[in-house]
Amino acid sequence: MRIILVAFTLMLSTLFIGQNQVVKFSGCIENPNHKEVKIYGPNRYKKVIKLSEGCFSDTLMVVKGSYSFSDGNESTALYFAPGYDLKISLNTEQFDETIKYEGVGAENNTYLAKIYLYNEQNNLNTLYSKKGPMNPDKFLKLQLKYDDGALKILEEMSLSDKEFENNQKEIIRLSSLNLILNQLNVDVLTEKGEKLKLTKHLLAEFNKLNLSDTVLFETNRTYRAVVNSFFRCGLVAKNSVFIKAYNNLSMLSVKDDVKKNLARYISFRTDDLDSYFNALNLISTDSSFIENYTQNYNKIKALSKGNPSPYFEYKNYKGATTSLADLKGKLIYIDIWATWCGPCKSQIPYLGKLEERFHDQNIEFVSISIDSPKDEDKWIAMIEDKQMGGIQLMADKAWKSSIVKDYVIKGIPRFILLDQKGNIIDANSTRPMVYNSKGEEEVNEELIKKFNEYLESN
């Protein structure tokens, strides 16, 4: 849940162009979890403030806009403007529920605290995951109901800062659009009859966007995300409105950003790879750009289910080598990781649980580190410290290793599942650990079912 809320904080960020201004910020925290608090903001702004008996006070040089405040465990949204002298108080045992503000700037920040808590209590990402697939009309009804609740909070505040108030109204609208587009993906703009109501709503909102405002596009993250999401969905759906709108874009920077955003979906995370590939060919005339994403597309297609896995052979933890050929005859679950990768390390305990569960069955768990060769000692130390089981290998050239290139790996951890013949089952397999509807970590039961399915069939 906290990951979702941090993402929501970033979604609230409307950035402004301006000079740094002085603001005063102080406060006291009951039951502090750490000895410091942190503030994050535009242009990678970060400020660490030490606590003294739970309290702090500092003078900040900041640009006007949205920030986030964190005690290390939880976070909330902040807003700073010139002349602010803001005081915050909270109790970490009920972080969001106890936030209070005083001083200059308290009014705007009190609203942000309320909307942040509202989002936590009515988070639609969680709601949609619990309810599963729903028809578009019901989806739209739930989203608009959420928007109405957020707008009601804003109206009841009767804020004196009308610029801030109008800004927040636009943030609610754009955040809503971005969520709809990301949840329902391209289906919402295919102009199919059963989704006509939602399609009409989205097209009406798209027509409100100012596609010639370069400053807005470059400084407002939410607006930029919405523009990209609209074009991504519309172009993949081959919706004539969006094809025409893209061709008519006057700003080359927007046109180029839309194209690059669409190209990023030529990856293993794309449900319909061919549709994204075709959409890019529809709008791109840059031969070098086309060649680059075509190579990527062809590599990914070669890693389709049933195709032979690319070959690999690397040094193992015991000093010898292990190759793909050595593992044939067994189901193979591969983890591509590194000692410096936090998300990779969070998967290790759950990978260990899977190994324990299947220790006497015909499956090999293979971890391949892409650490730099000079960090081999760190790799060995972590294997020993975390008592990592399975087959531990170290790739020879870090990110330039053949397995990284052959499997088109752009980020880690990355998991790969191969069958007993060394053929690909899933080149971008699910992880050992997943989050449940409560935001809690648990072993991936769907992955266990898949292991059993292939073990029983061979």
Image (tube, rainbow, N blue to C red):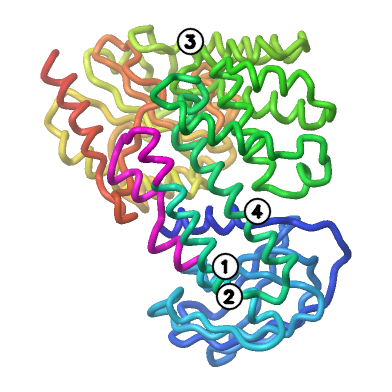
Q: Is residue 378 left or right of residue 212?
A: left
Q: Main secondary structure of the magenta part?
A: helix
Residue 408: give x, y in percent of width and height.
54, 21
Say which mark, if any, is on residue 347.
none
Tell me the CA gap for discs 2 and 3.
54 Å
Amino acid type, residue under disc 3 in the picture? Lys
117 in the magenta segment: yes
Q: Nearer the viewer, residue 367 or 226?
A: 226
Tell me the CA gap for discs 1 and 3.
49 Å
- Would you say the residues marked 2 and 1 are in contact, meaning their CB atoms lie under 8 Å apart? yes
Q: Which corner quadrant of the image does residue 109 belong to?
A: bottom right
Q: Earlier in the sequence, mark 1 or mark 3?
A: 1
Tell me the CA gap for discs 4 and 3.
41 Å
Which residue carries the number 4 mark?
170
Q: Earlier in the sequence, mark 4 or mark 3?
A: 4
Q: Secondary structure at mark 4?
A: helix
Q: Residues within 10 Å of mark 4 (few under 14, many from 20)?
A: some
Which residue carries the number 2 mark?
157
Q: Residue at x 56, y 20 (%)?
A: 266
Amino acid type, residue under disc 1 in the picture? Leu
Q: Secondary structure at mark 1?
A: helix
Which residue carries the number 1 mark?
154
Amino acid type, residue under disc 2 in the picture? Met
- Would you say the residues marked 1 and 4 are in contact, meaning their CB atoms lie under 8 Å apart? no
Q: Earlier in the sequence, mark 1 or mark 4?
A: 1
- Would you say the residues marked 4 and 2 are in contact, meaning their CB atoms lie under 8 Å apart? no
Q: Residue at x 46, y 49 (%)?
A: 144
Q: Earlier in the sequence, mark 4 or mark 2?
A: 2
Residue 396: give x, y in percent of width and height.
54, 27
Q: Which residues are magenta?
A: 116-141
Q: Secondary structure at mark 3?
A: helix
